[in-house]
Image (cartoon, rainbow, N blue to C red):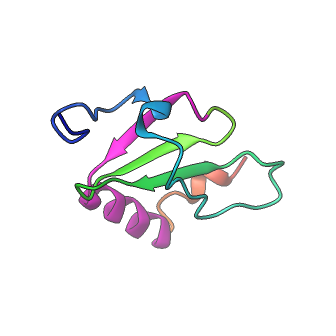
Amino acid sequence: MSILDGLVYNGMPAADLGDQGWECPWSGPNGGQCVETKQLADGRVAVRQSTDPAGPALIYTPEEIAAFVAGVKMGLADHLAAG
């Protein structure tokens, strides 16, 4: 049975997706705390917290990721960084 046979689900342990292929697409002066992403074979994207690599992975479709990125570029998430 492959990992794509219904075994990949939102909230699953990120460790179950393996150690290889995780990227930190953006980071800054945040002390090593960042969001890591992994492109899955079926096109979905897994997201995990770098400081908890075995913790839960959020699984998004390509369309969901595209909508999020587009919204960020349009400033729709600026309030999240207002602190």
Magenta region includes residue 60: yes
**Image height check: is 46 above or below 25?**
above
- Image mark count: 0
Quick one: 70 or 29, which is closer to the camera?
29
* The N terminus: image quadrant: top left
The image shows residue 46 at horizontal and vertical percentages of 41, 46
Vertical placement of residue 57 versus 21, above or below: above
Left or right: where does residue 17 sit relative to residue 36? left
The residue under the point 35% across, 58% down is 65
Q: Is residue 1 above or below residue 38?
A: above
Q: Which residues are magenta?
A: 53-74
Res. 51 image quadrant? top right
Left/right of residue 35 with respect to residue 47 in the rendered view:
right
* Residue appearing at x 53%, y 53% in the figure: 22
Horizontal and vertical percent position of residue 74? 45, 72
Residue nearer the viewer, 67 or 10: 10
30 with respect to 44 (left or right): right
The residue at the point 66 percent across, 53 percent down is 81
Determine if the magenta segment contains residue 59.
yes
| Residue 40, image x, y percentages | 33, 53
Expressed as whole percent of the image width and height from the top left, the position of residue 10 reads: 33, 32
Q: Residue at x 51, y 57 (%)?
A: 77
